[in-house]
Amino acid sequence: MIRAALCFALVPSLASAEPRFEDDSAGLPLQHVYSGGWEHFVGGGVAAFDCNGDDLPELFAAGGTAPARLLVNRSDKGGGLRFEAGEVAEITGVTGAYPLDLDSDGHLDLFVLRVGPNVVLRGLGECRFEEATEAWHLPQRDAWTTAFAATWEAGQGWPTVFTGNYVDRSDPEGPFEACDGSELIRPGAQGFGLVESIKPGWCTLSALISDWQRSGTPELRLSNDRHYYVKGGYEQMFRLATLEERTDWTKVSLWGMGIASRDLTGDGLPEVMMTSMGDQLLQFNRGGGFEDAPYAQGTTAHRPYTGGDGRPSTGWHAEFGDVDNDGRADLFISKGNVDQMPGMAMDDPNSLLMQGKDGRFAEAGLAAGIASLHRSRGAALADLNGDGLLDLAVVNRRAPMELWRNVTEGTGAWVGVAPAQSGRNRQAVGAWVELRGAAGEQAQEVTVGGGHAGGSALPLHFGLGAGTDAEVRVVWPDGKAGAWQPVRPGEVMRIERR
């Protein structure tokens, strides 16, 4: 485990790299809109993953009452973003999707969240999919699913998955104080098995399984929407082995929308970021518990920074990533009014919070060119054209999807790391990748979940700053650490377990 704190004084100087993005939405083959009534006020996620082996991420975007779309990446390396429509069965009612290799056959599958029974699409390679919902014994329920997370428990050939549900569609007394329960689905012999219910539910909108304490014991953290549980609810943490809720930590209640994690202090422990209506909440991981970040940290992003609307913001998808490759993780937050909530901002631009040398964050969304005033929902912060710079895909409610190409000049070096192992859990979900070099010490975990209704299955991206002399290792899901090895800047390193 990395134990040393970041020492910013030792980071080599890097010419100021002010973030800049260009609107490449014209590179989409159609105007894709997340549409629908009140059951699609939430959701609108997007999955980013490579389904044809060309090292460029495809996108699968939720459509609500419109069909979900598979967008196949045809961008030229380093060039403009360009996608074409992929072939996939027409599925409506989709709130989001997460990519993972469920059957460990080397092809990424899609777990599709819906208003209605969820669907599993099995990847066949070359961006072809077939429905495997029944074949893999996915339990069916007419719920309103808005959250997902997954991991491989020790000795299991299939993953344990969590599906988080929002308001109970069958409760005639709803929607207030009518939150639905959620499910933890254990693995079966060839697919899904035992279902364990989490009741009462607190209107879960995002979930993430992480080894929060680096103890070898992953735990499930839920972010819940106070708007509908009204009272009595809170953010939750569960031990997975026996599905036991933790009560030995300080409870937090907020209008939880999205969740993200990243080690920001260099101690190897992941911090947690939760979006909300009003203040966004960053908590530092102190080993035995979590501590709210002070206002001066710059992560609350509580009001619009342009557009003239002074009412509180509504945050949705949160994702950490090093936008300028200076060795410090930055933070993207998609924003937008739920629909017409009068107490919240209507003109609510997405936030791009850049981390400085002192660890504090500063808003750069307007200068970067991403200050769209659409009602945004899900997003992906990913290198879409293979040039080592993280681009943006944003799904909007009742407005067209957007693509933003990162054209920042004067950025640092970078490296991508893709751990892989044979047999079960090919993606090495639960592994930690640790990097040490002139830009400090960094650690990232391979997870499935988080964000708002969508996530990525891509190589882990590390900025290296001005220096390129760094080394990396993988701590595998069972806790065994691989050897340190030199990084290859400007490449994606595929590290296979031997």
Image (cartoon, rainbow, N blue to C red):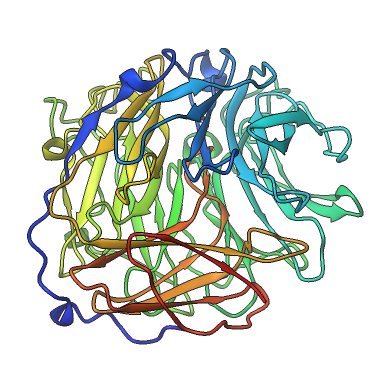
**Between 429 and 204, which is closer to the camera in this rendering?**
429
- Quadrant in the picture for residue 441: bottom left
Vertical position of residue 60 compared to residue 54: above or below: above
Number of numbered discs visible in the structure rendering: 0
Q: Position of residue 467 (x, y in %)?
A: 21, 73
**Between 243 and 477, which is closer to the camera in this rendering?**
477
**Residue at horizontal 73 percent and vertical 65 percent from the top:** 422
- Quadrant in the picture for residue 320: bottom left
Q: Position of residue 343 (x, y in %)?
A: 29, 26
**Residue at horizontal 53 percent and vertical 37 percent from the top:** 453
* Quarter of the figure that contains the C terminus: bottom right
Residue 437 visible? The answer is yes
Q: Position of residue 336 (x, y in %)?
A: 33, 28
**Between 263 and 201, which is closer to the camera in this rendering?**
263
Vertical position of residue 168 compared to residue 480: above or below: above
* Relative side of 22 to 60, left or right: left
* Relative side of 253 to 208, left or right: left
Toward the right, the furthest residue is 189
- Quadrant in the picture for residue 30: top left
Q: Position of residue 411 (x, y in %)?
A: 18, 56
Vertical position of residue 325 compared to residue 442: above or below: above
Residue 118 visible? The answer is no
**Residue at horizontal 69 percent and vertical 45 percent from the top:** 107
